[in-house]
Structures are given as C-alpha cells and as structure tokens.
Image: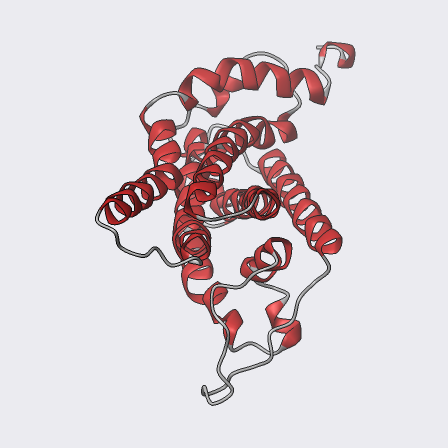
C-alpha cells in the first residue's frame, strides 16, 4: 500500500470519534455522567429540605461539595471508569486488529477514543459545578472550579490511559496514586506537592479543602502555583501522556493481548 493512502492524524481522529461515539452513550457513559451530577443533586435536595424546615445552611457548603465530593472522590473515579474503555479494552479483547482493517495513523488511536471520554466527562463536570451555584458558589468561583475540574480530569484520564497501556494492572496502580499519594499533599514539602494532581486543581480553583494545622505531625506549609502555570502544566502533562500512549501502541505487537502485549 502506498504511503499516500495512509490517513492524516486528523482524519484518523475524526474517523475514530465518529465510529466510537455511540459507545460513549451506552451504560458506561451514563455511569460516568451520573458520578459528578448525582451527588450534587443529592446536596441540592437536602439543602432544599433543610431550608423548608428553617434550618441554616453553612455558607461554605459548596466548597465542601467541590473539594471533598467532586475533586477528591468523583473525579478520580470518573477517570478509573473511563480510562479502561479506551484503547486498552481493544487490546484485551483482541479487537484492535479490526480497528486497523483500514489504513490509519496508529499512534492517534488512543487519543481518538480518549478525547471522547474526556469531552463527555468534562460536560458533566461543568454541569455539576453549575449545581454548586445553588449551594452558594459565585459565578467567578464557578468559572475557576469548572476549569480546575475539567483540566485535572484531562490530565488524570490521560495518565490513567497511559498506565493501562504500560502496566497489566495499570488501573490498580492508578487508583493507588490517586487515592493514596495525591491526598498526602497536605504533609508533603513544597516540591513534592507539585507532583500531585490535587496541588494544581487547588491552585486553579483558588481554594483548598482543608488547611494543615501547625501542630499536625509532619505538616508542611501549603504552596500554590500561579493559575496560568497550573493550567499549562495540566495541559502539557495530558498531551505528554497521550503522546506516550500513541508511542506505546505503535510499539505493541498487534493482535496480542493481556500479558502477551506487555512486551
């Protein structure tokens, strides 16, 4: 086959996106959508009931909903749900040769599938942030909170997709990083704080979930990264992970799966 028959990266991206979009609208996709929206909906229902009963609603409730519910739990779970549905699924199910039945730019395939899961998840993260407005958030806070979640989701999803291609148990390693390493930002010295996702999310959002008390064992001073730089770091990190995903797939023997494809 002549080289001119090979599609451009954009053509491959477009073809994969069109062909794979219906899969995003199936059960896994709606689970992904419910993860950020359902908890905020429950918050809104509870606060409505309390208001009707004349109870006072804490003015900073929206911060707890943002940091503890969305940022700490829902966002990592979303990445854990979405990442395995990308190119790793095709490798494990031995269906990737079917994707290559027609000429394509192989290294673009992980991003082609991943960008759909990013766009779908990002949409519902913004919807969840909009719900925080009813809990007391301001329009300005909404902008920074939505940007923080969407950009962090971009980086985390790319990171999880890369781990899934490089390691046989990539999802497990990713879960350990997100739920054990990342929360330790509270006691990390400055430079180590910069290698957690939480640090950049909070730098963009402009708020933190908790402050470390001076008397707390191993407590360290919390640092911040300028918003513009934090945004750049997350975007570049995500792009780097997607690029490595493409390289890994390009180097993986096609038609193999499981331990055979670990190479």
What coloring was used for the rendering? secondary structure
Near-viewer residue (139 or 52): 52
> For residue 247, what is the image quadrant?
top right
Q: In this rendering, would 87 be left or right of 199?
A: left
Single out the residue that lies furthest toward the left: 53
Residue 138, given in percent of the width and then of the height, sits at: 55, 46
Using the rendered image of the protein, determine whether residue 238 is visible from the camera's viewpoint: yes
In this orientation, which residue lies closer to the viewer: 177 or 131? 131
Q: Residue at x 61, y 72 (%)?
A: 192
Res 257 → quadrant: top left
* Left or right placement of residue 39 versus residue 109 in this view: left
- Does residue 258 lie above or below 55 as drawn? above
Q: Position of residue 118 (x, y in %)?
A: 53, 34
Q: Is residue 94 above or below residue 22?
A: below
Give the image location of residue 207, x and y in percent.
56, 61
* Residue at 59% in and 14% down: 15
């Amino acid at each position: 086959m002549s080289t001119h028959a090979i599609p451009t990266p954009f053509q491959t991206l477009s073809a994969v996106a069109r062909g794979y979009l219906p899969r995003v609208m199936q059960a896994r996709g709606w689970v992904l959508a419910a993860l950020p929206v359902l908890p905020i909906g429950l918050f809104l229902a509870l606060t409505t009931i309390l208001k009707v009963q004349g109870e006072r609603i804490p003015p900073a409730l929206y911060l707890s909903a943002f940091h503890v519910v969305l940022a700490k739990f829902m966002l990592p779970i979303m990445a854990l749900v979405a990442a395995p549905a990308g190119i790793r699924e095709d490798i494990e199910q031995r269906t990737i040769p079917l994707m290559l039945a027609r000429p394509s730019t192989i290294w673009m395939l992980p991003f082609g599938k991943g960008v759909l899961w990013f766009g779908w998840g990002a949409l519902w993260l913004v919807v969840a942030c909009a719900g925080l407005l009813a809990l007391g958030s301001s329009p300005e806070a909404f902008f920074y909170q939505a940007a923080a979640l969407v950009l962090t989701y971009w980086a985390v999803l790319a990171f999880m997709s890369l781990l899934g291609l490089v390691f046989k148990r990539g999802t497990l390693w990713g879960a350990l990083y997100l739920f054990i390493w990342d929360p330790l930002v509270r006691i990390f010295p400055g430079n180590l704080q910069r290698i957690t996702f939480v640090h950049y999310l909070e730098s963009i959002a402009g708020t933190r979930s908790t402050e470390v008390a001076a008397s707390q064992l191993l407590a360290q001073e919390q640092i911040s990264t300028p918003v513009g730089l934090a945004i750049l770091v997350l975007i570049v990190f995500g792009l780097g992970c997607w690029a490595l995903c493409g390289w890994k797939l390009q180097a993986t023997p096609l038609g193999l799966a499981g331990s055979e494809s670990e190479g």
